[in-house]
């Protein structure tokens, strides 16, 4: 047998990767969020697009709390990419806990790792990524995030186990 054959097929490896469900402990920042009646769709569960609004909420709330002026500041964060893996359904009136970490920190962008948890549960009902690129409000050209946000991003990257090397990516 070759080393490749003992590792399994690419579809088996993909199944194993999908089976890894993050826990709340994988995320250093937590934020409570209450589902709303309007989050449910006709099938009686939170609609898939609503998960992205939860991602947007936890990332932006964290950035605002750490110095990003989304109303009048010269720098804003725009979403360049997002992903989501769904593990279990949630529905109104579930209370949620959102987990936030940094998966990659660059000079002008951050890749957030985000987990959605039913309150009191340790395994994610969904998890994914959200990439913010920092741009000038007026010209929309990439820029370095302002202080104190830049320092807070570095600190959260450290707490996320991502180190202080802005280009370093580590797996979780």
Image (cartoon, rainbow, N blue to C red):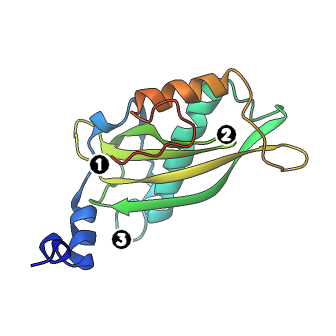
Q: Which residue is mark 3?
A: 43
The residue under the point 55% across, 40% down is 59
Farthest left residue?
A: 1
Q: Secondary structure at mark 2?
A: loop
Vertical order, 171 against 13 (above or below): above
Give the label on residue 124, or none.
1
Give the label on residue 62, or none.
none
Question: Is label 1 or label 3 in front?
Answer: 1
- Cα gap from disc 1 to disc 3, whole angstroms: 21 Å
Q: Is residue 38 visible?
A: no
If you read the primary sequence from the N terminus, does the residue marked by circle 3 or circle 2 appear first? 3
If you read the primary sequence from the N terminus, does the residue marked by circle 1 or circle 2 appear first? 2
Q: Are marks 1 and 2 in contact (CB under 8 Å)?
A: no
Q: Is residue 133 left or right of residue 104?
A: right
Q: Which residue is mark 2?
A: 107
Q: Secondary structure at mark 3?
A: loop
């Amino acid at each position: 047998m070759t080393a490749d054959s003992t590792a399994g097929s690419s579809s088996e490896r993909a199944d194993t990767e999908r089976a890894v469900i993050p826990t709340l402990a994988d995320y250093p920042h937590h934020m409570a969020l209450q589902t709303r009646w309007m989050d449910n769709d006709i099938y009686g569960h939170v609609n898939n697009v609503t998960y992205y609004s939860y991602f947007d909420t936890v990332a932006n709330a964290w950035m605002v709390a750490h110095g990003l002026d989304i109303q009048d500041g010269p720098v804003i964060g725009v979403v360049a990419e997002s992903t989501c893996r769904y593990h279990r359904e949630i529905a109104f009136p579930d209370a949620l806990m959102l987990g936030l970490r940094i998966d990659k920190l660059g000079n002008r962008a951050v890749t957030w790792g985000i987990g959605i948890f039913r309150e009191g549960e340790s395994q994610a009902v969904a998890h994914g990524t959200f990439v913010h690129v920092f741009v000038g409000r007026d010209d929309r050209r990439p820029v370095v995030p302002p202080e104190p946000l830049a320092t807070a991003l570095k600190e959260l990257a450290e707490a996320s186990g991502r180190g202080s090397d802005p280009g370093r990516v580590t797996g979780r």
